[in-house]
Amino acid sequence: MTRAAQAQRSDRRQTWLEAFRLTRALSLALAAPLSEEDRCLQSMPDASPTKWHLAHTTWFFETMVLAPLAAGYRVFHPAYAQLFNSYYEALGPRHPRPERGMLSRPSNAEIMAYRAHVEAALADFVAQATEKTWQQALPLLMLGLHHEQQHQELILTDIKHALSRNPLNPAYLPRDLGMVGNQTPLSWIDFLGGLHWIGADDAAPFAFDNEGPRHQFFLQPFRLASRPATNGEYLNFIRDGGYGRAEFWLSEGWAMLQAEGWQAPAYWEQDNNGHWRHFTLHGLQAIDPALPVTHVSFYEATAFAAWSGARLPTEFEWEVAAAACSVSEGHFLDLSQLHPQAAPAGPGPQQMFGDVWQWTRSAYAPYPGFQPPPGAVGEYNGKFMVNQIVLRGGSCATPPGHIRASYRNFFPAAARWQFSGIRLAADA
């Protein structure tokens, strides 16, 4: 190998290693405002303790990369294989998900030592691996980075739910969000029908397996709202009796509303004077009518759309509309404001990326020709392609650089603890 080729190889590896270190540092920065007691909290089966997230993302690099590919690597602790495996059946038994909050041990200090151990071993591996091994490891390393970014968002949404269960309403990061006041007027943007390409381009630096294969899809002409629905618009839905009018609701959603007693989005409440406020990562705040509504289920999104005389977009309509928008303009994870911002004025659809995940009307299903990759990583997405709904666009808790137009998130229709919002669509 020539010196130039060696230098290029070293540069590629150093670029990846710097991205790895920055990603790992962000996870610790997100945990920093939390006490050790906070880090152990699990407020519902769908959420996980912060400490578990920090360990699981470390387990992923250890199990998927170091153990099979790094010669002579010794696992930090053999019991961690069971404690921090999430859902990989091919990798053995797992601690039950609803009981992750019972894991007071290993301690937070031991988890930090685990992270340091794996990070040091991975740095050595990246520096010393043969080019053949490096090429074999690189897709797994990239997957591990994006996997940790997903868990960074979960750290925030899970701790928000946990802190909201405390009657003291403790803030993750105290801050007065203030009031924007006037919302940007909503307009409609028309899109042509016809054949459109859907899915991640083969030349993309990274994409999850569920974003492909890239394929063509025929769309009828459609219209898309210029921005997500706001708190003010959703308040009008509430005031018009939206939660008591079955004609707007899917049957399953109506049953869920009655069973759960929903009267407003998650984290909303009325004070003694009838004023609406909601719990945020910055504490209890007055509801700003200009900001995007968030923490609504798919059922609430479809009911609001029906009340509005509209519908939700399909994920294919959403992707076609988002293709001309800049991801860099989105408001993503920013510790100075972990809450959606008001939509700016301007031509074209606004806030396609960031602020709130946008429910679509599409069931989470495989694209034509989809095949899960072999081995344990094949369990990452494919086995969840049932009873889930696709969301698009990212949120104010999504790390910058994680989202693209082809990105497909998915949650059950009743999920409300994510930063999920609404963008209306209609037939043209």
Image: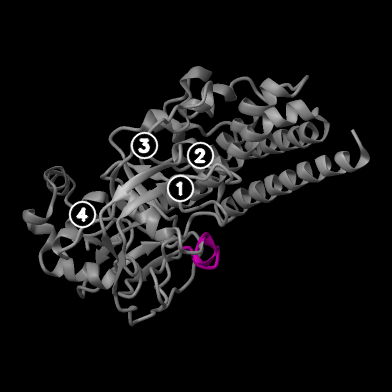
Can I make out residue 417 in this image? no
Distance in Å between CA atoms under marks 4 and 3: 25 Å
Do residues under tags 2 and 1 come within 8 Å of each other at their CB atoms? yes
- Give the labeled residue for mark 1: 407
Residue 39: x, y in percent? 52, 45
* Nearest to N terminus: mark 2 or mark 3: 3
Q: Main secondary structure of the magenta part?
A: loop
Disc 2 and disc 4: Cα gap in Å?
27 Å
Residue corresponding to mark 4: 302
Q: Which kind of residue does numbered mark 3 sit on?
A: Pro
Residue type at mark 1 is Tyr
Q: Assess disc 1: are there few (<14), some (14-19) or many (≥20) residues with their C-alpha within 10 Å of its C-alpha.
A: many
The C terminus: image quadrant:
bottom left
Pointer 2 or 1: first along the chain: 2
In the image, taking residue 98 as reference, residue 107 lies left or right, namely right
Residue beneath disc 3: 45
What residue would you read off at disc 2? 208
Circle 3 crowding by C-alpha within 10 Å: few under 14, some 14–19, many from 20: few
Q: Amino acid at mark 2?
A: Phe
Q: Earlier in the sequence, mark 2 or mark 4?
A: 2
Looking at the image, tell me whether mark 4 or mark 3 is earlier in sequence order: 3
Front-most of residues 411 and 203: 203
- Assign a secondary structure to mark 2: loop
Residue 328 included in the magenta stretch of the image: yes
- The residue sitting at 36% across, 41% down in the picture is 44
Left or right position of 377 against 230: right
Q: Which residues are magenta?
A: 327-338
131 or 289: nearer the viewer: 131
Q: Residue at x 58, y 36 (%)?
A: 55
Q: Amino acid at mark 4?
A: Thr
